[in-house]
Amino acid sequence: MALRHIVLAGALSTASTALWAQESGATSIDGLLSELHSIVETDRAASHVPGTVYGIVKDGRLVFVEGLGTRDPQTGEPVTADTRFRIASMSKAFTALAILHLRDLGKVNLEAPVSRYVPEMAGWQLATSDSRAITVRDLLHHTGGLVEDNPWGDRQQVLTEQEFSALMASGMEFANTPGAAMEYSNYGYALLGRIISNVSGKSYQKYIVDTIMLPLGMSSTTYNVFSSPAGSRAIGYRWQDDGWVREPDMRDGAFGAMGGVETTANDYARWMAFLLSAWPASDSPESGPVKRSTVRDLVSLVSFMPPIERAEALGPPCRQSVGYGGGLRVVDDCDLGRVLTHSGGYPGYGSHMALLPEAGVGSFVFNNATYTTLGLTNFKLMLKLRREGAIPDRAIPVSAGLALSYALAKSAWGAGSVEGLPLANNVAPDRDLDRRARDIAELKEAVGACDTSSAIVPNSAMEGRFEWSCERGRVAGRVQRAPTADLQLQVISFAQVHSQ
């Protein structure tokens, strides 16, 4: 997968702006690049982040990436697209996809109790005598009843496998009964890592690297930060007493399945492009290490979280519905639509990613400051691009069946009757055909001749809406096929559009 990018350590160039406009296919984008830069740089400085890299992936390519600040205040070396950052809990999506891949292979049953794959849990006493066992699916969706454990979980990163086994064998107190509520659990994702190791016969790190990362070309991505080449890493700091304090590096360990990945902007863009390639579903050949339908399963089964009010800094009030899939949150935003997102917070690091699957666009930001994700900043970027018209949702293609349905609607309009069309058996009982003919005649009398050349706008492969300009107003219509193999219309309707 070829990726084109620009690495900018300081001011923006006119060449970069031109390339961005060309790559995005949006003629209105020329002036946006400097505004994106200003958004990120302002928030980076205000948050006391030594170094940041952010990027935008569109239609399978990294179309823009910029490094800001320094990877290490002690050296002053600039951040680039090849600087390695720990991405903390953004690692969870790799773990979740590995579990789903093992499910595809028939090696993991999501509905099975976790103790089937992790013997140390066999003796756990659940919250109540009538609680069911924790399942693998519970761990994916954070519904296992385990207590929310930020930031405790981060400090367990360094546990050896033996220490983790001892922790599991000692049991667990429960916050809820399994399946009762969503409560974010790093422990739960560490357990998923152990499942991967036990089932695959490899360490979870090696399984994920071999099965997902290397096939995607993510050769600079690792769990073992001490294996990274000297001078390649962003060094982690926290802001304290008006200065940066070095955070000690934590070694890779048993809890890394919940947050241990270190990667670069160039590598992570490959991952985002692969995730986005799963939408929309298509007949094109599979080209990734895991099936596209499996990627979609990361967000197809979701545990719901309480709705939230969007931050005032993002614009007008907006209540977002939120759910948790597998390593990705699913947010329904009033401006962006469906957003697949996750943040990562870690001693010395913070990160955030967001995907708009219907638009084929994603953005990410990595930082080397403790728990500073700049997630709000990342949403600002996406909203800026959306509001300027740079990242519209992809048009849903018109299927052959829907095109024929629309042609039948035009025929009915011209004939003044739906009689003779392939109608489903609900149509006449819902409103008899003579009455429908009179409806069409009355509507024609009201609006006059209509231009029926406008395209139908699909809701799906089976349903669409249309609107026609007429001599004395407009007509809106809808066609919807019945759920049958042969084409039958269960809805064919026409209505006058009344101005408000």
Image (spheres, helix red, strand yellow):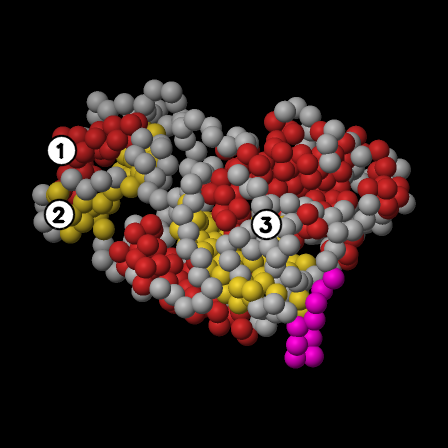
Q: Position of residue 35 (x, y in %)?
A: 39, 67
**Magenta stretch containing residue 90, yes or no?**
no
Mark 3, other Cα within 10 Å: few <14 / some 14–19 / many ≥20: many
**Magenta stretch containing residue 240, yes or no?**
yes
Q: Which residue is drawn at the image coordinates 39% and 44% (left, top)?
A: 59
Task: Write down the residue under mark 1.
Answer: 414
Distance between mark 2 and mark 1 Cα atoms: 14 Å
Q: Which residue is drawn at the image coordinates 22% and 40% (left, top)?
A: 455
- In this orientation, does residue 252 appear? yes
Q: Position of residue 188 (x, y in %)?
A: 73, 45
Helix, strand or loop under label 1: helix
Task: Write down the residue under mark 3.
Answer: 263
Residue type of the residue flagged with mark 2:
Cys
Seen from the viewer's position, the closer of residues 287 and 307 is 287
Residue type of the residue flagged with mark 3:
Thr
Mark 1, other Cα within 10 Å: few <14 / some 14–19 / many ≥20: some
Quarter that holds the N terminus? top left
Q: Which residues are magenta?
A: 239-248
Q: Is residue 210 left or right of residue 337?
A: right
Residue contact between numbered discs 3 and 1, judged by CB atoms under 8 Å: no
Compare marks 2 and 3 and give the one earlier in the sequence.
Answer: 3
Distance between mark 3 and mark 1 Cα atoms: 61 Å
Q: Is residue 19 above or below residue 285?
A: below
Q: Is residue 64 left or right of residue 395?
A: right
Q: Is residue 3 above or below residue 315?
A: above
Residue type of the residue flagged with mark 1:
Gly
Task: Write down the residue under mark 2.
Answer: 470
Disc 2 versus disc 3: nearer the observer: 3
